[in-house]
Amino acid sequence: MTTSPSPRCGLTALARIAPNPMNGVCAMMATTIRKLAKSDNETRMQREVRRWINGQAREYDNGVAGVLRDLAYGGCASGYVSGMICYADTLAFFREHRKEIASLLAETLADFGGTVSQLFGDKWDDSDPLAEETQNQNLLAWFAWEETARALGQSAGIDV
């Protein structure tokens, strides 16, 4: 598995890719997971993302892996997550989960070994380092949703 900065519809975030030697595309699991199970220490943000994934997975032949693949391909910026399109929705998500988002960002930056500007590229407004304005709050909401979904999938054995 390799880790590299990867643009997602203009959003630069971390992508973890498990190459499939058969076709060079992300590897899919042999067993289809239809639903992510609730964990005992699940946070509110994890619960919200897990419920969305499970709802979407019903529409996919390959279940959760299909949802995570499509989310990784287009990200929240593509409009794939209908509840994360409008500023009203993304800013409400950011406000509700601000502490979890801050922890997730700090953990990601420690793993990444870079700065917020390096992680998000030109999408991050350097004049707003505390994310007090709409643009950076929106970006952090998308980041948190995508990274939480990726982590939930990874904990279920799905690498996308």
Image (tube, rainbow, N blue to C red):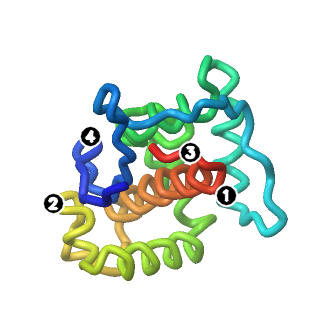
Residue 13: x %, y % from top left:
31, 57
Identify the residue position indicated by label 3 in the image: 158
Q: Secondary structure at mark 4?
A: loop
Q: Residue furthest right?
A: 40
Residue at image coords 38%, 82%: 110
> Image height check: is 157 above or below 99?
above
Q: Residues within 10 Å of mark 2 (few under 14, many from 20)?
A: few
Q: Is residue 92 visible?
A: no
Q: Secondary structure at mark 2?
A: helix
Q: Amino acid at mark 3?
A: Ile
First-in-chain label (3 vs 2)? 2
Q: Nearer the viewer, residue 97 or 28?
A: 28
Identify the residue position indicated by label 2 in the image: 122
The alpha-carbon separation of the residues under discs 4 and 1 comes to 23 Å
Residue 130: x %, y % from top left:
36, 80
First-in-chain label (4 vs 2)? 4
Residue at image coords 45%, 43%: 160
Kindly indicate whether the residue at mark 3 contacts the one at mark 1 (C-beta within 8 angstroms): no
Identify the residue position indicated by label 4 in the image: 9
